[in-house]
Amino acid sequence: MFHHVILFLLFKQTLGDCVCVPFWKCEDTSADSEELDFSSRNTCKGHFDVCCRVKCGKRRTESLVFSDARGRILGAAHEANFAEFPWMLGVISGNSYRCGASLIHPKVALTAAHCVQAGDGYVIRAGEWDWSHANEPLRHQDRRVSKVIIHPQFSLKSLVNDIAVVIVERAFRMGDNVGVVCLPPQNSAPIPEECVVTGWGKTSYKSVNGFENVLKKGNFPVVHNDDCEAALQGALLGPGFRLHDSFMCAGGGPKKDACKGDGGSPLVCLVEGEEDRYEQFGIVAWGLVCGLTDAPGVYVGVARFIDWIDRQMATHHLDPQIYKYH
């Protein structure tokens, strides 16, 4: 009987928004469906794998942490637990960490355009937590980048439209420490008080020790763009500064900010009415002297770019439904 169940699950096929995972990790509510598709192109090759509908944006609340190492983002009470944010990625250039990113599809990362200007030669790492140790409960995964798609209206000088879609050569394997984040509907707004930033950036602009090893998290409320513009004007930029509408803001206050090395990292906000499920509304873009002013940090407003992201996915025959919650 058990043998027949395995065979059934092996050939079980959902719609296009699914990935191959071991059947015991699949929470697809349609798993008991009578519909089989033995000829589907999505049939998994692994003996115990099934094509499972992805549940995007699920934050791990049960702790797998095994170290008391200190965390890294300014203003956070403590480090992220191991695998707490399974969509968190690292962008590697050469042998060095360069920026953060997020996983929106098993083959697609989302990051800031200024992080991937070279266009090729990058590696994306998923499932990482502490860069200084290899003895974590689950191994990280590295994938070479096959294509970088930078927004056509990106400006390196002003960082407007600072967003890039990065396609890797081979899909990441989903697991407890590797998953996708949800993206919100076009032009939607988050719950302002329920947003979290993660990253491996420096704890201070004065730091001489390079980027930090352990992933850190910080609860940063969203700041309305008008208030953010006024704060940035009053801090350093003067009355003539205007905040471009491709940006959004979050955080602010002494020692409560993202910092150098957090660029490209995701700002995620709780899905209304859900528990521990998140959509990505921001990408760390820029800020003033990190943590030393009352000015908020500036992020790419991801919700303004959903239609553009969807078009890039369609062009490359990748299913955008994987990151759709609504």
Image: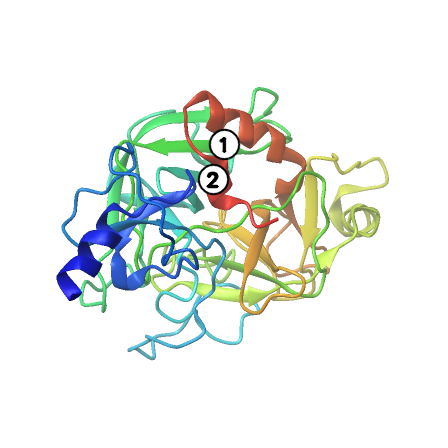
Task: Looking at the picture, tell me which residue is in the foreground, 8 or 168.
Answer: 8
Q: Quadrant of residue 48?
A: bottom left
Q: How is the image coloured?
A: rainbow
**Along the horizontal axis of the image, is 297 left or right of 13?**
right
- Which residue in the protein does label 1 denote? 164
> 10 Å neighbourhood of mark 1: few (<14), some, or many (≥20)?
many
**Please, is residue 149 above or below residue 302 in the view?**
above
Spot occupied by residue 212 in the image (x, y as percentages of width and height): 38, 60
Q: Amino acid at mark 2?
A: Leu
Distance from disc 2 to disc 1, alpha carbons, whole Å, reads 6 Å
**Residue 312 seen in the current view:** yes
Spot occupied by residue 125 in the image (x, y as percentages of width and height): 30, 47
Q: Considering the numbered disc 1 on the image, is that residue within a helix, a strand or a loop?
A: strand
**Please, is residue 321 above or below residue 121 in the view?**
below
Marks 2 & 1, CB-CB < 8 Å contact: yes
Q: Residue at x 40, y 37 (%)?
A: 108
**Residue 118 seen in the current view:** no
- Which residue in the protein does label 2 denote? 110
Q: Quadrant of residue 104?
A: top left
**Please, is residue 86 above or below residue 151 in the view?**
below
- Reading the chain from its start, which is encountered first: label 2 or label 1? 2
**Along the horizontal axis of the image, is 12 left or right of 4?**
right
Q: Residue at x 79, y 37 (%)?
A: 241
Spot occupied by residue 128 in the image (x, y as percentages of width and height): 31, 57
Q: Considering the numbered disc 2 on the image, is that residue within a helix, a strand or a loop?
A: strand
> 10 Å neighbourhood of mark 2: few (<14), some, or many (≥20)?
many
Q: Amino acid at mark 1?
A: Ala
